[in-house]
Every structure is written in structure tokens, then in C-alpha cells.
Amino acid sequence: MDESEVTAGDVEEGDVATGVASAGSSFHSLRIFDTTLRDGEQSPGISLNLREKVEIAEQLARLGVDVIEAGFPISSDGETEAVKAIASQIKGPIIAGLARVDPRDIERAAEAVGSAQRARIHTFIATSEIHMKHKLRMSAVEVLEAARLGVERARLYVDDVEFSCEDATRSDPAFLAEVYTAAARAGATTLNLPDTVGYALPAEFADLLSYLASEVSDEVMWSVHTHDDLGLAVANALAGVGAGARQIEVAVNGIGERAGNCSLEEVVMALRTRRTVGGFDTSINTREIARTSRLVSMLTGYAVPPNKAIVGANAFAHEAGIHQHGVMVERTTYEIMDPVDVGLEGSRIVLGKHSGRHAFTNALEEMGFHLDKTEIQKAFDRFKSLADRKIRITDIDLEAIVADELSSDAEEYEMISIQVAGGTHLSPTATVRLRRSEEIIDESAIGDGMIDAACGAIQRATSIDARLESFNVSSVTGGIDALGDVTIVLVSGEAQDGPVRRATGRGVSTDVVEAAARAYLSAVNRLIALSHRQMAPPRS
Ligand code: KIV
Ligand code: ZN
């Protein structure tokens, strides 16, 4: 493919501070394909509802990704609906739907992305011996034919078809070349090389891509999809770019199957910070990175480790005295990036106790949230009760409230109220009132502490028997009146024969017991949502 087709986001040296691309420089813009909503959402315990997915997609569009992989439509009816909603509401990026080469998968993906301004079907089949033999139970000849037919079928619906050989890095290179050639001839426009199990080393991955690019003569764009099992996802993606790939598949905060995918923020900032060496950049508006990371973390319940590159709380913190001194004298002594460039300029105070609905709605709109009337009302009620307890409310607090409200949208159980009592001489007791469609449920429990009592009362009210696997408390911003942010992981099904399910829930409140109760209920709701999801049977 002619590289000029992908240089729309070229930037001039010196634009680093703005994060905004301008035309006419020698840097080639790489295509950023975001799979937070598909591979990212496959992380254990994550189950986003439709509203949360649309909100993340909106933020990804603001961030400037080129492609949003919105989901795997055949995996459930809910997933199909979410991809449809993203396809019809999100303007700008290409919207992709994943499909095995199975006709039913492809038809479902076509239906789901059909209303997108620019639609893509991403179809795949495994090509390694181990997958063909044990998972697909197909011969190499059958896989080759299925790949060709799958791409041909996808092309009946869309012009933009991406094809992947799953487990490519453990496949026979000559067979890979055959399959990719067949896919390209059948009409695939992007060929993606996945390191599905995170097995490759950078030089080896680059060699494989160079070999395939030289063997497959058709005009295609090469793409890389790397996993982080050996901590090499970003390094492998960059090696792939060096070998000719012009699309990188990424996920925000690096979430994804097992150890996760190539992290969007890391690869984008590596390309940007070292672009005079690499010669590449992206059209990502880097100033939206921190906010995107916070939103994804809030909605998925996956906390960002403090030492995570680019978006971790300590990524720009300097502990050693010698470093602090250096940075005070001249920031660049110990900082290779400006925190402002990734959107870390600190929280802005936006509202206070006396702010009314109008100011509240304006603040949300300015921040890019598009909520309907009911959502605004619910978020406003939360804001008012927060404003009674917290003098200054920042944009980051607002993000947390909205994320919390979006999480509870369309959930099985809704929290109406919680009351707790306890102290040195009183057993901790909690009473919760929940709503389940028209039904109101009141339950109480005594516990070892107030949080234990609150979770026990919810367990009784919902009759969901689950084990608490982890419990984490942090704060959204600093200060004694900061919003408490609780993340809980629940596991169900261990005692029965059925599948073991794991769900993460997150809740925020100035009261940590209330935050914990919200997080617990959110995890319960996600367990219920996960039990409604059913994957279509794999191809035999
Ligand atoms: O890791 C993988 O192989 C995938 C494919 C579906 C591209 O996610
Ligand atoms: Zn993957």
C-alpha cells in the first residue's frame, strides 16, 4: 500500500507540546486500531454494559484513534446491540466488528457494523499446528480454504476487510504466507499478524513480518497485534513497525486477554517521544490520554498500577531528592515527556455546593459527556449529595460520578439507600434497600465491620452467593474529603458444577462504606450480566 495513504496525521517536530498533528512533515502516521472494547473487554472480570461501551467509544473518537474494534458481535445479543449502537452513533473512526471465518459470525458482524460511516469486518482463523489440531480439528488445507471463503464472504458486505491468522507466531511461516496470500487475493485490505500468546521476541517478530511482506505481493496494509505475556507487547509492536507494519492494535491501559494487549498510551508516546529516530507518529491527540485511561479504568474496574508507564500515578513523580532538585531547576533533567502532553495537568475545580443544574449540565457537556435526561437527573442527584459533603468538586470527581452512574445503567439491582450503625460497643449492622424492576427489597446483616455488614446485606438481598476475591480502596483525588474509590472482585460458581465467573465492580462515594456497597452491588450485577452472555459454539 502506498504510504501516502496513511500520512494524514503527519506532524512537524516541535508539535510535541500540542499533541495535535499538522500537515507537511517527514513523519509517517501509523494507524491506531483500538481493541479496548473487544480484546480489552475479554479481560477476566470485565463486563461493560452498552452505555459504558458507547461512552468509551466516544472518548476513543475524541482521542483520535483510527479504528475502533467495537466487539465480537456473535458472542451474544448484547454484544451485537452494543456494536450496532457504536456503529450508528460514533462518527470519525472506522468501526470494526470481529468474526471468525464462519458464515454466521460474518453475517452477524456485517449486521452489527452496517450503519457505520466506515465499516470494517475483521475476520480470523487459527493457523498454528496446535490450534488447528486441538481447537479447530481442521487440516491445513481446510483452514486455508476456510480463510479464503471467510474473506470472500466478508467482502460481500464491506470493502474494508481485515484478516488475521490467530497464533501466527507459533505457525509455520510458509503456511502463513499461503494463507495471507489467499486472504489478500480474496479481498482483504489489511493483514494482521497476531502474537496471540505473547510468545515472540522483537527481532523474531520483525523477521516474520518482513518475510510475510515479501512473500505476499498484493497491495495490503500490514498490522501487528501483540500480547504482553512476556512483557514485550510494545517492543514487538515497534519491531513490527520497523519491519513494515503500518497499523498497530492496542488497548487503553494495556488491558486484554491474560497479561493484556499492547498499551495504547505506551506505544503512542514511544513513537511520539522518539519520532526523530523512528520516523513515525500517530494522529492521537495525546492530551486526551490521561482522561481516556481514567474512564476505562473506572468503567472496567481495572485499576492502573502506580508505576505504569505514562498513566500510572507515579509516572511523573520524583522521589529521590537529587531528582526533585533536578526537575525543579530544569524539568527535562529527569522527564523525557511533559505531563501536560498526556493530559496530566491536574484536576480543575469545576463546581461547588451552590452550582445548579445548568452549570452541572454545562460542565458535563464541556467534558464531552452526552447524557440523556434520566442520566443527567441521576448524575445530578449524586452530585448534589456529594456537594453536601465536599466543598470543591473537580472535573475528575465529575468523571467518577458519571462513570459510576453509567455502570449502574440498566442493571438488575439498583441501590436506593444504605444505612449502617456500629462502634466500639455495637455490632456493625447494615440495612440496604435495593430495587429490582418494580420490586423493592430491604435486607439487613451483621458483620465483622461495617463494610462486611453492608456486603452481607447485599448478598442476602440479591441471593447471589459469591466469594470476595479482592478488595481495594483508593481515592479519586487528594484531600480528606476526597471521593473514596473501591474496587471489588467477586467469584461465583466455585461450589457448583457450572462455570466459574469472576466480576469486577467499582463504586465511588465520600463515604467508604457506601463506596464499598456500590462496588459490591456493581460486581453482583456484572456476575448476573456475565451469566446471560453465551458464546456461540466454536466451529467444529
Ligand atoms: O490475539 C489474537 O490473536 C486476537 C485475534 C482475534 C486478532 O485477538
Ligand atoms: Zn488478541
Image (cartoon, grey):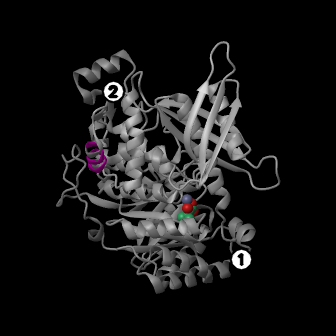
Residue 127 vs 185, above or below: the answer is: above
The picture places residue 397, in percent across and down from the top left corner, at 38, 36
Q: Quadrant of the C terminus?
A: bottom right
The picture places residue 286, in percent across and down from the top left corner, at 30, 48
Numbered disc 2: secondary structure: loop
Residue 114 vs 519, above or below: the answer is: below
Q: Nearer the viewer, residue 205 or 468?
A: 468
Label 1 crowd bin: few (<14), some (14–19), many (20+), radius 10 Å: some
Residue 525 vs 108, above or below: the answer is: above
Q: In this figure, which residue is indicated by the disc labeled 2?
A: 391
Q: Residue at x 40, y 76 (%)?
A: 115
Residue type at tag 2: Ile
Residue labelled 1 has its Cβ within 8 Å of some atom of ligand 1: no
Q: Residue furthest top?
A: 424
The mark tally for this picture is: 2
Q: Nearer the viewer, mark 2 or mark 1?
A: 2
Q: Quadrant of the N terminus?
A: bottom left
The picture places residue 307, in percent across and down from the top left corner, at 47, 33
What is the number of the mark on residue 343? none
Q: Is residue 168 magenta?
A: no
Cβ–Cβ below 8 Å for labels 2 and 1? no
The picture places residue 413, in percent across and down from the top left corner, at 60, 49
> Where are the magenta residues, as a range?
359-366
Label 2 crowd bin: few (<14), some (14–19), many (20+), radius 10 Å: few
Q: Nearer the viewer, residue 373 or 160?
A: 373
Left or right of 44 in this view: 271: left
Report how far apart the C-alphas of labels 2 and 1 lie in the structure. 64 Å
Ligand 1 positioned in quadrant: bottom right
**Res 329 visible:** yes
Q: In this figure, which residue is indicated by the disc labeled 1?
A: 138
Q: Main secondary structure of the magenta part?
A: helix
